[in-house]
Image: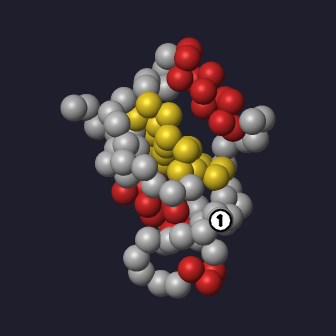
C-alpha cells in the first residue's frame, strides 16, 4: 500500500481472514480523520468502510463491522451483501492462512 497507494479514504474495504485484526487496524488509521493525530488508535468518524470477516472471533475495533463465519457459506455471504448495502467493494485485503 505504501508503494502503490491502494488504500484511499472513502473506499469500501473487505478484510478476509481478519483475526487478529492487524489489517483492520491499519485500515482504521488510514480512514481516520486528519485531525486524529499520529500514532496510537484512531478515533472518531471514519472516511471509509471496513468490513472484516473471519471464522475466528475478532476483538472489536471501533468503526470496523465484523462478520463471523465462512464467507463461502450462503448466510455469511448474505450478511456481507447486507453490510455492503449495494456499494461496490474497492479493495479486498487478506492474509488468510490455514489454522
Q: How many marks?
A: 1
* Quadrant for the C terminus in the image: top left
| Quadrant in which residue 89 is drawn | top right
Give neighbour class at mark 1: few <14, some 14-19, many 20+ (Cα, 10 Å). few
Would residue 19 appear left or right of 99 to someone viewing this image? right
Counting from the top left corner in percent of width and height, residue 58 is at 37, 43
Point 43% across, 24% down: residue: 70
Counting from the top left corner in percent of width and height, residue 26 is at 45, 63
Counting from the top left corner in percent of width and height, residue 55 is at 36, 29
Residue 20 appears in view: yes
Q: Is residue 7 above or below residue 35?
A: above
Q: Is residue 59 above or below residue 56?
A: below
Q: Residue furthest top?
A: 74
Would residue 57 appear left or right of 63 to someone viewing this image? left
Q: Element under label 1?
A: loop
Look at mark 1 in the image and give the residue it sits on.
45
Q: Along the line of sight, which residue is nearer the eye, 13 or 3?
A: 13
Point 47% across, 84% down: residue: 38
The colour scheme is: secondary structure
Counting from the top left corner in percent of width and height, residue 63 is at 56, 55
Point 42% across, 81% down: residue: 39
Residue 95 appears in view: no
| Quadrant in which residue 46 is drawn | bottom right
Would residue 67 appear left or right of 22 to someone viewing this image? right
Q: Along the line of sight, which residue is nearer the eye, 84 or 88?
A: 84
Q: Residue furthest right?
A: 86
Amino acid at each position: 500500500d505504501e508503494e502503490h497507494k491502494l488504500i484511499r479514504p472513502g473506499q469500501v474495504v473487505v478484510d478476509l481472514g481478519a483475526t487478529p485484526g492487524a489489517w483492520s487496524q491499519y485500515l482504521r488509521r488510514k480512514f481516520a480523520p486528519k485531525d486524529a493525530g499520529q500514532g496510537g488508535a484512531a478515533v472518531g468518524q471514519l472516511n471509509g468502510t471496513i468490513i472484516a470477516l473471519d471464522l475466528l472471533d475478532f476483538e472489536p475495533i471501533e468503526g470496523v463491522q465484523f462478520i463471523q463465519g465462512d464467507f463461502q457459506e450462503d448466510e455469511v455471504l448474505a450478511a456481507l451483501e447486507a453490510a455492503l448495502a449495494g456499494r461496490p467493494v474497492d479493495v479486498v485485503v487478506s492474509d488468510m492462512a490455514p489454522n
